[in-house]
Amino acid sequence: MKLDPIVLEGQHVRLEPLSLDHVDALAEVALDPDLWRWTSERAESVDELLAYVERALAAQRAGTALPFATVARSIGRPVGSTRFANADLQNSRVEIGWTWLGRGWQRTAANTEAKYLMMRHAFETLGVRRVEFKTDALNERSRAAIRRIGAREEGTLRKHAVTMSGRVRDTVYYSVIDDEWPAIRRRLEERLAVGSRTSA
């Protein structure tokens, strides 16, 4: 498994490798404190957003991550970001996370399709056995979104991480494994098809 840069194309979103060229466009939607309320990192200013992208690119150079800009195809502009991270070749697993979307793109097909594209790539191209997700135990919206895509809750790591605000958070872990992927893929494709007909 190697996280080579790739474009993942859907009907609603295009995931393209994140670069410094995306910073100005992302700044139009990212500088919202509510986006970063539950995250371990934050980007509430252009300088913080630039540092956020630079850290993501450093992880990519180290071979453990592949960050994306989430581009809304309807407007051709980035509206958020997500990434593969904590890639573990020996144990055939990868995490999907560091996901955020501008306020106007939340609760739309954008997140569902991005997760679908990434899991499809992880299981069917990278050949992983396990895709992991994690979130702050207090982030009920994120927890519900992860459950909706079919991931199974595995447990809570207490006092697992320190956020940039200094709060010590509990982290809830979820996963999808390769045996479950075919059924989850079908359900996600059905949901996306219904959403496309509804928005047409």
Image (cartoon, helix red, strand yellow):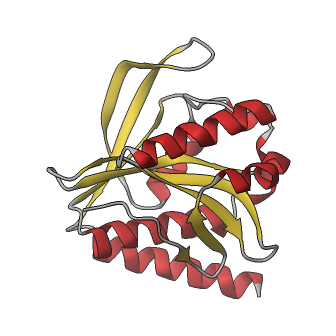
Indicate left or right for 183 with 102 as reference.
left
Locate residue 109, reporting x and y percent: 64, 69
Q: Considering depth in this image, is 139 or 21 the residue closer to the camera?
A: 21
Above or below: residue 192 compared with residue 51: below
Who's the residue at 39% across and 64% down the image? 4
Above or below: residue 30 compared with residue 193: above
Asked if residue 21 shows in the view, the reply is yes
Q: Considering depth in this image, is 161 or 57 the residue closer to the camera?
A: 57
Who's the residue at 63% across and 82% down the image? 11
**Residue at the outermost left position:** 90
Q: Considering depth in this image, is 5 or 97 the residue closer to the camera?
A: 5
Q: For the C terminus, which image quadrant? A: bottom right
Asked if residue 33 shows in the view, the reply is no
Above or below: residue 41 compared with residue 99: above
Who's the residue at 41% across and 29% down the image? 171
Indicate left or right for 92 with 114 as reference.
left
Q: Which of the 4 image quadrants contains residue 118?
A: bottom left
Q: For the N terminus, which image quadrant? A: bottom left
Who's the residue at 39% across and 34% down the image? 172
